[in-house]
Image: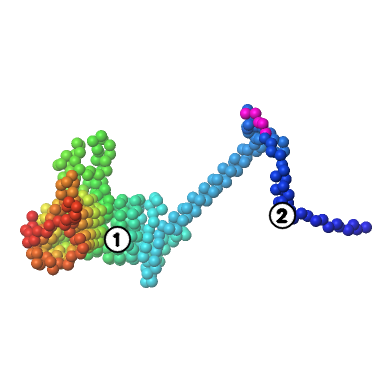
Amino acid sequence: MSRKKEKVNKPNDDFLAQEAKESQATAEEYTIDIPDDEIWTYHIEGLQEPRINVPVKNSGLKKAIVIIALLIAIGLAIYMSFRAVHNDTYEYKDLGDGTYELVKFSNPGDLKEITIDYVVDLETGEKDMSKPISKINEYAFNCDEILNEISFGKYVKEIDGKSIYSCWWVQNVWIDDENPYYCDIDGVIYSKDLTEIVFYPNDHDKYIRAKTGYDNLLDDDGNPMEELWGTTERYDENFLAEYNKVVRTYVVPSTVTKIGQLAFAYSNITDLYIPEGVTTMEPMAVFKNTVLLNIYSYKTESKITDVTYKSINSMSQVYNSLPEGLEYIGSDCFYYCRGLTYMYVPSSVTYIGHHAFWDTVYKEDGELKGVKAIDVAASEDDFSKVEKGDSWRPQYDYMLFKKSVDVNYQSQRQ
């Protein structure tokens, strides 16, 4: 015999809410008097008993599970981070002629030496020998603080002047001997025919120090010292002069006619020798070389490719400042070269870019230092015909104003 189900009317949510409010309004207020010494252990009837100082069941197992879970999560995070860095290490562009451009290199943090010759497969890490690299983009290496050595392969035929920018610890850049476009002289990049210097690495002097035995310098307390910036109690003027001659003197080969963009930027050269055949100094060619003390130009009867001070003896004539026959001085060419005290512009110059000699003069303790005036060979009328960019000559504080240094026309070279 089946029993008929009775319909049950359940109260709706609004009714329950109203009932709860009425109960709360009529409920009696009360407080619990808990003794101070039982504050953490007092048990209220109907609630779970406090577990202060009471061991948790299977606590060791639970801790182990939590630790294992954390280790797995950390491992996965590290793995994914590594994969992300690896995939972002190289960025390439297909040039459509079977070769590729290196657009960007991002150091994963531990690469001190790198060879750029073929495209690296980002999944396997292996080089694809069917994809040679022929071009290095501007800022491809940008502000890298790890790399010491860079090597370019035989197919690289275009290296942008800004491709290795502010890479403070790069000591050498090597070029494959089979490369028909570029070569290196002991780690400094040149065009294959040695008519253009492309790049002098920022930390090349460290390599020279090791090569010439100046990598064991000590400060006055006997602690190792990497670089010698001036005299100390241990190293006097004579030692510093010899040090600068051996380590920080550079002779541009006699075949060179162009000093490329940023070629000597940020370098630690104190004495730079330029051959008389140089006609062009590109923008920022000697940008912010703060230790450069002297620019010399030279003539020679024989070919000079020895870039050390030893080749000075082969020069037939050496004279101060920029070479005769120079035509083009690019923008920011000598920007912030505050160690210089003399600048002579030959009559052959037809173009001076903006801020070419900017910040080569300054005040220290109220005294004017650096390039206080610019001597030019041309007359005032002839020099007015030279194309000049804004603020081409340096300025210094003069009372409440900025004053440009004087130009001495029809000057004789010092």
The foreground one among 225 and 207 is 225
Instruction: Say which residue appears at 17% left-offset and 42% top-offset.
Output: 239
Q: Which residues are magenta?
A: 32-36
Residue 210 percent across, percent down from the top left: 26, 46
Instruction: Say which residue appears at 38% left-offset and 58% top-offset.
Output: 105
Instruction: Say which residue appears at 19% left-offset and 55% top-offset.
Output: 402
Question: The disc labelled 2 sits on which kind of residue?
Answer: Asp
Instruction: Specify few, some or many for label 2: CA neighbours under 10 Å numbering under 14, 14-19, or 20 or more.
Output: few
- In the picture, the quarter occupied by the C terminus is bottom left
Question: The disc labelled 1 sits on which kind of residue?
Answer: Lys
According to the picture, the residue beneath numbered tag 1 turns out to be 162
What count of labels does the image hold?
2
Q: Is residue 265 left or right of residue 104?
A: left
| Farthest bottom residue in view | 97
Please name which of the two marks, 2 or 1, marks the residue nearer to the observer: 2
Is 132 magenta? The answer is no
Q: Is residue 52 visible?
A: yes
Q: Is residue 293 visible?
A: no
Residue 38 percent across, percent down from the top left: 64, 29
Say which element carries label 1.
loop
Numbered label attached to residue 14? 2
| Farthest right residue in view | 1
| Farthest front residue in view | 26
Label located before the other in sequence (2 or 1): 2
Instruction: Say which residue appears at 41% left-offset and 57% top-offset.
Output: 89
Instruction: Specify few, some or many for label 1: CA neighbours under 10 Å numbering under 14, 14-19, or 20 or more.
Output: many
